[in-house]
Image (spheres, coloured by chain):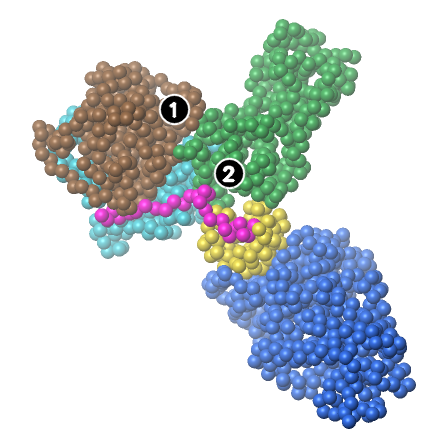
Chain colours: A blue, B cyan, C brown, D green, E yellow
Amino acid sequence: MNQYIFHPFVLPFVLGMAFVLTYCVVGLLRIIGQLPKDDRKKFWRSLVTPKTAWANIRDLFGDCLFHVKIWKRNPVLGYMHSAIAFGWFMIIVIGHVMLFTLKPLEGVDVQGFARTFTNFYYPIFYKHFATETPTFAFLMDFFLLMIISGILIAVVKKIYSKIVGVKRITKFGFADNMIRFALWTIFPFRLIAEKSNIMAFWWLYSIDLMIFMCMLPFTRYMHIPTEALFILLRHAGLKPREPRKGYALAQIYSCPSCGLCIDACPMSVNDKNSGNTSAYFMKKLRNANDEEAKRIAETCMQCGKCVAVCPVSIESCDIKMSQREATPYTINSDHSYLDSISTEVEKSPSVLYFAGCMTQLTPKIMRSMKKIMDAAGENYEFLDKDGGICCGRPMMLSGKKAEARAMIEKNTELIKKSGAKKLVLSCPICYKVFKEEYNLEGIEIQHHTQYIEELIKCGKIYVERRDTKYVYHDPCELGRAFGIYDEPRYVVHSVGQIVDAKSEKELSICCGGSLGSFNLTQQERDEITANSVNDLMFNNPDEIVTACPLCLKTFSKKSPVKVKDIAEIVGEQIENC
Amino acid sequence: MEYRFKGHLVEELYKDYRIKEGMKACMNCGVCTAVCPAAEFYKYNPKNIINIVARKNEQDLEDLLKSDTIWYCGECMSCVTRCPRANAPGLVIMSLRKLSMKSGLYMLSEKGRQQYVVVKDLCSNILNYGYCVYPRTFAYETHKEYGPVGKWINDNLDDLHARMGSNLDGDGPGGLRKIPKESLDQLKNIFDVTGATELMEQVLGDAHNEAVKENLTDEEYFMKVYTENDWEKHLNH
Amino acid sequence: MIIEGKQKIWADYQKDIPDDHYFYVRSCIRQAFWPGSEVTFLDITRNKLGKDFYENAYHTTCGGIAYHSDTIPQETAMTIIARQFALMKESGYENYVCSCITSFGCYTETLETWHEYPELEAKIRQYLWDSCKKEFAKPKYLAHASDIIYKFRFEIAKQMKFPLVNVKTGKPLKVVEHIGCHYSKMFPSKGFGGAEYPHVLVGMIEAWGGEVVDYPERRHCCGFGFRQYFVQANRGYSESNTHKKFESMEPYEPDLIITNCPGCPYFLDRWQYVIAEQTGKTYGKNGYGIPALTYEEVAGLVMGYDPWDLGLQMHQVAIEPLLEKMGIPYDPKRKYQGLNGKDLGQPMCPSCIKSV
Amino acid sequence: MKENILIIGGGAAGMEAATQLKKLGLNPIIVEKSDKLGGHIAQWDRLFPAFHPAKDVVEQMLNNVKDIDVRLNTEVTDIQRNSDGFKATLSNNDTIDAKAVILATGFDLFKAERKQEYGYGIYNNVMTSLELERFFRTGKDDRINNPKKIGFVHCVGARDVKVGNTYCSKVCCTTALKQACEMKEVFPDAEVYTFYMDLRMFGPGYEDLYLKTQKDFDVKCIRGRVCEVSEDMDGRLVIKAEDTLFGKPLKMTLDVLILMCSMEKAKSIDKIQQQLGVANNSDGFMQNKDMYLGMNDSKQDGVFVAGTCTAPKSLPDTIGEARSVAVEVFNYINNR
Amino acid sequence: MEFGFCLSPSSHVKMDTIDLTTFNRLKETNPDVNTCIACGSCTATCTAGNFTEMSFRQLLLMLQRGKEDEAKKMIQRCMLCGKCTLVCPRGINIRKILLDITR
């Protein structure tokens, strides 16, 4: 005779589970459905391409299960997260394994639908229905205690976040607090229920689970199921096209609101602005608060540090860009006047130097570059010596991608006409757009840090080393965007001593001058600059060196020591020899 | 340079007494522009004129003399009353116009070329009749705004003036009397010795050359200049 | 409006006008367009006021219009002026009165310039000798003809028959005064009342019973602009300026405009006709327009001259509504007659602005 | 040592100089032609740049001169130099023997009606900056009836050849902005415009006042001199100016127009000045030895100058000069 | 009747009647717009200004003087490069204002 292992207290859990599974399936279909056709194709292909498939497996385990990135950031935080997530995962896995080993239960024969139904809750509540083997009992208790230890850390973290090396944690609304409370109590209830077998705790345990699962789609814990999908999509090489659809939606659900980006964000130096960080941005998107999402998207400086520290690798900068692109405009640009600019060139240089708008405001960089190129005996020409055309990046940063085309095309025409084989840029802002949006086949594009490094290395210029202690600031759009960390350091090292900043390379702090932000006021920017300068002054350098005209200009206002461009310090030392 | 003047424009301009009188130093307060009738209806700003003249830049001055700008002023001299620095933009305009004509640069602008019409009408009236405006040369056909009454006046010119007590073409004193030949000769002499004749002949000559270039008779060219109006271009709105 | 404030300024800007013996110089435009005005002026001053006004047959245009149209050099204009002064001297006069505002401006400017730059005066002296063999002279007094009427405005008021009063309502007529720009804008001290609140016409209006209308664009130019009128292509400028003035004065419902400049009454009159033709808009009541008269015409009217002897039929804007308001009798038949009742036909009726 | 020092003028400069001279052990005597001390500043409501009540300053100054010999309603009618210094005859026939004379006669406000095109005294709603201060003090002025549009004209009677004053009157810019803010405080819904040529924010906190004027008070500063004012049918003021930064003529209707009148040297002292041999500069203000080290020195032995009789000055400038003149006089007396 | 000329429009900025909708909207989100001192730094440094009449100072005035159409035409020249913002002595967030105007 068929006999069910059943008790009404399992119903809340079953309902919750059914709800969340349905939600996830529908959500998955929706996200895949929202992907543009070519993206979808890319996605399917990536699943079967060995390289991406391997990466998928690696990250699914590394990120989803073992939280390698969080461990790297902070071991306590890593443990906390792994204890809960990995512990829970293990309990579920072991529970299921046990289900098989315990089968068949005495006097119970469950078949067909009933079996499936039973499988739903049996591993979760088995202790109510059966006695486990000692090995399993130990494992289950071990992981349960591990989870509870993680929860204890979480509770402490909530009260005193510095314990995990975090200054600010995300502030949550009612739903997020509620589900967190549910999560924290699930496992103590289970422990009590298992040990005491008091029915009330079984009920509490089940109801807690139901609350957790029913709220999950509407809270940050949605990242648990979504992250896996996000990893697959990310490895397929997709880019968010619309701020709340498809790939972006997967990212929105994948954001755990952990708040690691809050401390990382340069804007957080002002508490008021910590609400403008990516964690909140993703929250606003999830809550469909378009107005706020738009505002935050336009406040962001696009320095990319939130992306660099994100344990889930959410590409929040890209989503913000797609949010900007979604903003409607009533007036479109008209750059047809560029057509009338002459493309005639007098000489045919092998190296073409494009200073860019920002460098026009810091002529000493141009002067130094000229000196360096003269010293190297290069056949060069300055493309924009009489004031050039903007590279188009600032326009793209406003989300007006199409409107940047006219500038990009005219510059392309000018560069190609010159016949140069190499294009040297002083401005990382330009560098990014030249690298990503320009089609300059056959022309090597270098930032002047790379170019100077090359000149030194091949002996075209000789710089005399001096005693000055320099600290090097990594401009966002050179460092985090392109990983150009070593070239400038090599150059600085050739000129003098180099000391570390407190935060370096991918963790370097934006100067605050960024063209990425539209909303920051001068005062807010000044605060960011002061903080960044402080960070750079950590080891008491004699001078600050950077490789971006905008950083140079921005730092110069606030720095207690001289701020120079890398070209400038090289130029100085050429003079001395 | 295509124009006849070979000297230094700035130097030449500053010889004019009207510049000495009208050109002190400008503080760009704008009262002249605010009161100026031309600034209201034309692309014109007396303050800017003063600034260009004060700059004493040969090229800027040349550009100004070639342009329509200097011909917009109506010489009402309202600007003179108000200027807190005692400049007289109206007088400055007069010397600019003279130099533009002298140098030939006036032929390069639509409004400048109109000097032909004004010179031809006014100078011939003065030299032939001793009047600037003379009813027998004031045709209704080219002055439609004279209105039906004006047409009636012209149609009955002799009768009407006789009725009004004018001495039209008569001897002795009185309105519209015939100016004695002796006086007209003296006017001609004055024109000769003071440079008016030379200026007049230059303008008439320039116009004739231009007419030939455009394959027009002098009369056709006159009517062209008299009526040609690139209206939109001159407006300031 | 605080009238005492204006009175204070009027008191500050007074000038001496000699009592008698004037050398009279005519205006080109007035002779051509308003012949009755100069005739009336001489009749009033000579016959009604008993003043000595001498007119020399050899005087000519002062060249002012040509000068301000930039067709003759400054030296030419000055030499013509010097010739006129020489004629005055030869005739034994020293009080110079001109009928034209442009002339008045040129004479004033010339005298001031000679005063400031004696070398220029010397140059003109030479030019005058070279061209006309005349002895250089300067007038002792320079006045505009309207200054004379202003000076004798109360004497005229004594002989007044039809004051500037609406006979039907008994209220004073609302009169707009329009001063020629070159009267006092260049040299405020040379005009009665100065440049901002000229009194020369206001004084007449008040003395003859009218009420002065001070409207925002009161000070502004009629738009003659010399070359801006002489070339057809430029006339929009001239018309637009007059239009601006009428738009500004319209709400005050003036009965009459009085001017002291030769060109202004012509423009204020004829542009009303053109504006009506082009835009359909007429000013004043009942579509007749607002009459723009010379000060002599107004003086003549109040003194009881026949309107047609004054030449009011030479205005495009119909004068009859004003005559009726003032209670001045007129014979409509005589309006378009020549000497001895000769029939001169009639002007056509304009399509928009009303005529009688 | 109790030498008499004659101070002509009981305004800010006179009072402050007297206060300091008293402290230095001399006997200052203030001769003031009006019936109370305080001069122009006593007619002011609040002071720029921080809207400080003028009353506070004036009261403190009055308190300082409590024990000083002050002759109100009195003018110096004659002054003669003698071997012992000066003998001054007053309008009440008193005489004063003094070792030194300080001219602290201050300024007259430019008579706004002289700038005829602005129609002061002709158009009802044109008023002066001083009259506006009176409005702020008393809350009453017939010309101010809940105005919706308010205009300020800078440089009235200053930087103007036509009225004979080519100098900058120094304090009107800041005063205009201060008054513009105050008007906006009283009439928050009104639009306030100032017509300036240059905004000369020369002192500490003045530029901040300018920023505040623009940002917090939304006062619109238009660069261009008002060219003329006329009255329309409703008695409102039609003004014309060029917006010189925009390069176009501009026309607008205002409910009230305030003229920022410049300072001119007080004329009532001309005769005494002549007797003392103190000359004027071309700008009509009294000449001093030089503007750096001899600013209080009238070039005449024993005659000193202080305050706005030598040039337009702000209140702090004037007080500074008053203090320096006291030291000058003290040294002069000691070195005799 | 053909006269061969006609009335010209007045160039006066008629402050009583001009439409300030755009400027007032802008002022709400960017109170900075009031604080321009017309120094011209933005115009002098403008990248687009090197090739065209583009001038932010003038643009702001156009909006304040009711010349919206002209302003909208001018702003199309802007490249949003941000130099103006960097040089503004009053620290006006010009780039943001430029962006807002185009909305």
Q: Is residue A366 above or below residue C42?
A: below
Q: Is residue B223 above or below residue D299?
A: below
Between the residue at mark 1 and the residue at mark 2, the CA separation in whole angstroms equals 33 Å
Q: Measured from the top left, where is residue D289 in percent x and y?
A: 65, 23
Q: Which residue is mark 2?
A: D148
Residue D308 is labelled as none
Dot 1 falls on which chain?
C
For this view, does C187 lie left or right of residue B130? Answer: right
**Which marked residue is nearer to the observer: mark 1 or mark 2?**
2
Q: Which residue is mark 1?
A: C193
Packing grade of label 1 (10 A; few <14, some 14-19, many >=20) is: many
Q: Quadrant location of residue A273?
A: bottom right
Q: For mark 2, give the secondary structure.
A: loop
Q: In terms of depth relative to the viewer, which is nearer, A504 or D101?
A: A504
Q: Quadrant location of residue A297?
A: bottom right
Q: In terms of depth relative to the viewer, which is nearer, B51 or D5?
A: D5
Q: Residue at x 72, y 54 (%)?
A: A527
Q: For mark 1, give the secondary structure.
A: loop
For this view, does A121 lie left or right of residue A424? Answer: right
For this view, does E3 lie left or right of residue B76? Answer: left
Q: Measured from the top left, where is residue C78 in percent x and y?
A: 32, 30
Q: In terms of depth relative to the viewer, which is nearer, B41 or A229?
A: A229
Q: Residue at x 32, y 29 (%)?
A: C174
Q: Residue at x 62, y 48 (%)?
A: E89
Q: Name the residue furthest bottom.
A: A1
Residue type at tag 1: Gly
Q: Quadrant location of residue C326?
A: top left
Magenta-tinted stretch: E1-27
Packing grade of label 2 (10 A; few <14, some 14-19, many >=20) is: some
Dot 2 falls on which chain?
D
Residue type at tag 2: Lys
